[in-house]
Image (cartoon, helix red, strand yellow):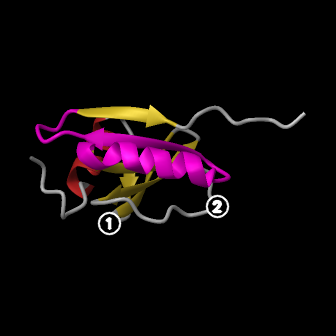
Amino acid sequence: MAPVSTPPAKEARSIFDSLGYEVLDDGDEFRARRKWREVRVTALADTADAPKRGELRCFVTWEENASRLRRELRDSNPEYEWAVIAVREGGDYEVARAPPCRVAV
């Protein structure tokens, strides 16, 4: 079982580095930049209040917390594109993106 009391910050950096992103800043939240795209990445040990504003955001959490975090993000319907990366103990991961935006007609 993953150490759920600490955020997967090291794993988050490793994932974005292996995807070819330049990782900027230290701490549990950092920026990952590649070409024109910059993503704000937050490593979480547990679910937390997601920011209401932003542009591209990615939340990296342990696999056992990912479903709850995705549900909370969908329910809060933030004004930005988001993704959740669920990290498994061995370092494997799975990415879940936000559902498509609903446009009122």
71 within the magenta span? yes
Callout 1 amino acid: Asp
Residue drawn at point x = 32 percent, y = 66 percent: 26
Vertical position of residue 5 compared to residue 72: above or below: below
Front residue of this view, candidates 44 and 47: 47
Residue 74 in magenta stretch = yes
Q: Is residue 22 visible?
A: no
Q: Name the residue under label 1.
A: 26
- What x and y, as percent, mark residue 36? 58, 41
Which element is circle 1 on? loop
User: What's the magenta region?
Assistant: 63-92
| Residue 53 image label | 2
* Mark closest to the chain's N terminus, 2 or 1: 1
User: Against 89, is 92 above or below?
Assistant: above
Q: Please name whichever residue, 31 or 49, is drawn nearer the observer in this view of the structure.
A: 49
Could you say where residue 82 lies in the image, as x and y percent from the top left?
53, 45
Indicate the secondary structure of the residue bearing disc 2. Answer: loop
Viewer-side residue, 34 vs 99: 99
Q: Mark 2 and mark 1: span between their CA atoms?
A: 21 Å
Give yes or no for contact between labels 2 and 1 (Cβ–Cβ under 8 Å): no
Graded by Cα atoms within 10 Å as few (under 14), some (14 to 19) or many (20 or more), the crowding at tag 1 reads: few
State the residue in front, 76 or 37.
76
Amino acid type assigned to the residue bearing label 2 in the image: Arg
